[in-house]
Amino acid sequence: MAETKDRIWTVPNALSLARLLGVPLFFWLVLAGHDGWAIGLLMLAGLSDWADGKLARMLDQTSRLGTLLDPAADRLYILATLVGLTAREIVPWWLTALLVGREVYMAGLLGLLKRYGWNGLPVHFVGKAATMNLLYAFPLLLWGSHDGGVATAARVVGWAFALWGAALYWWAAVLYTVQARQLIRALPPGGAENEGVASAP
C-alpha cells in the first residue's frame, strides 16, 4: 500500500488535475457571461469530483497527492464561483463572507496542526456533502439569474442547496476542530517531537 499512496500518475489524480486546470476557464466564462458553458463545465467538475473518489477506491489508487488535489480543486471551484457570482450580483456578499470566512478559519486550524506535526485531517463525510451541495447550488443559481419559469425553479432549488451547503460547511469545520483538539490532546508531554512526525491524510 505504501507504493500506491506515493504514486503520482494515477487516473484519479489525472481527473483532479484536469478539474484544477478548468478553474481559470470557468472563472472567465462566468465573468464573460457565457453561462451555458460555465454551467456545463461546473457540472463536469462535479461529476469528476465524484468519479475520482470512486475510481481511487475501485482501482486501489488512493494517494497522498490525491488527498491534496481533490479538496484543493473543490475549494478553488467554490472560490471562483463565489467571486464570479458575487461580482455579477447573483450571490449576496454575506454568503460569500460566510463561506470565505470558513476557509480562513480552516487555514488557521490546519496551520496550528502543522505546528504539532500533522499535515492535515481526513476528509469528513459532512465536509464532502457540504461541497457537493455547493457545487449543485452554484450552477442552479447561475441558471436562476435568467428569466422564465424554469429559471425561477432553478433559483429556488439553488438557494436550498446553497443554504444547506453553507450550514454543513461550518458544521464540518466544527467536526474538524474536535478532531484537531483530540489529536493535540493525545500528544505526550513535549509535543510531536517525542514520537516523530505523526501525519493524518
Image (cartoon, rainbow, N blue to C red):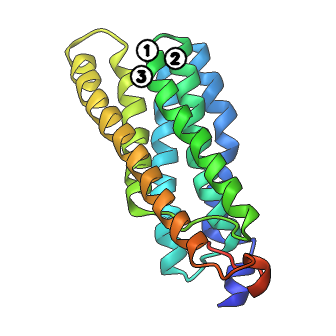
Which numbered dot is residue 125?
Answer: none
Callout 1 touching callout 2 (CB < 8 Å): yes
Inter-mark Cα distance, 1 to 3:
7 Å
Q: Would you say 148 lies left or right of 139 here? A: left
Please give the name of the residue rendered at 27% of the width and 25% of the height, measured from the top-left corner.
Answer: 154
Whole-percent x and y of residue 190? 75, 78
Kindly identify the amino acid type of the residue bearing the numbered disc 3.
Answer: Leu
Residue drawn 80% across the image and 79% down it: 193
Residue 85 image position (x, y, % from top left) = 50, 19
Position of 4 relative to 116 (above/below):
below
The amino acid type, in three-letter code, at marker 1 is: Ile
Q: Quadrant of residue 160?
A: top left
The residue pinned by badge 3 equals 142
Q: Which residue is mark 1?
A: 90
Q: Are marks 1 and 3 in contact (CB under 8 Å)?
A: yes
Other-residue count near label 3 (Cα within 10 Å), few / some / many at <14 / 14–19 / ≥20: many
Where is residue 56, by image quadrant? bottom right
Q: Residue at x 64, y 37 (%)?
A: 23
Please, is residue 101 above or below residue 154 in the view? below
- Identify the image quadrant of the C terminus: bottom right
Cα–Cα span, label 3 and label 2: 11 Å
